Amino acid sequence: MPDELLERLRRFQEDAFPQQRSLFRHLVDEGQHPLTLFIGCSDSRLVPYLLTGAGPGELFLVRNVGAFVPPHDQSQGFHGTAAAIEFAVLNLQVRRIIVCGHSHCGAIRALYGEVPAAAQNLACWLDLGREAMLPVAEPGPEVMRRTEQRAVVLQLERLMDYPMVRERVEARALTLHGWHYVIEDGEVHVFDVGVGAFVPASRAEHAGTGPYVLGDDDSGLGASGVPLS
Ligand SMILES: [Zn+2]
């Protein structure tokens, strides 16, 4: 009985890799220079490369349960996602950060339910989405969608608490993008900061820079805040 994973690895090296050998050679010789930090939910149905048409070297990718952004102040201990944000902005100097949530998100659903008692880290992690919750006992599909979208905006707001992020956004060197991917439609709804709501990508006029319109005084707050219909 052949080991399926070994089979897949061999197939990659023999069939797929040769077609991209020179591209990978270039990326090794010149180093990686991705323009985009993509923070996405770990959900297996979210496939960033398919959505964006990106190839090797184009996306600096961080995925976690819920596509959450931890606070910058290190108050919660170790955070791979926070480290990745700092590395992407300071070392790679990415030009945009996408936070991508999605429909039927188990993390968002878990906010309204119970997690197993043994899942202590998960229970703690979900705190990063709680502010997005709506005050309902029985969340239906519409409440789920709105919570998923509110959670994306919440993470964009938390990104703005990272000094190196805020500084570059204000200097117009970095844009922030909130996405909500509807799996069954194959469509991403982007947070349109001009409208203060999520709009299908096919109709949107502004794809960045969330979460709020920066005022002249740079106070930021008050323009749209967490919008959210
Ligand atoms: Zn999810």
Image (cartoon, rainbow, N blue to C red):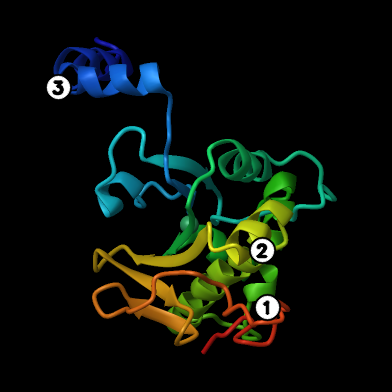
Would you say residue 145 is visible in this rendering? yes
Residue found 36% across the figure and 72% down from its top: 189
Mark linked to residue 220: 1
Q: Give SS at disc 2.
A: loop
* Mark earlier in primary sequence (1, 3): 3
Nearest the camera: 109 or 41? 41
Asked if the beta carbon under badge 1 is closer than 8 A to the nearest atom of ligand 1, the reply is: no
Across and down, in percent, residue 178 comes to: 47, 67
Q: CA distance from mark 1 to mark 3?
A: 47 Å
Residue that carries the numbered disc 3 in the rendered image? 19
Q: Which amino acid type corresponds to the residue marked 2 in the rendered image?
A: Met
Sequence order check, earlier mark of 3 and 2: 3
Residue sitting at the far right: 75
Q: Is residue 101 left or right of residue 136?
A: left
Q: Amino acid at mark 1?
A: Gly
Label 3, label 2: how far apart the Cα atoms are = 40 Å
Q: Residues within 10 Å of mark 1 (few under 14, many from 20)?
A: some
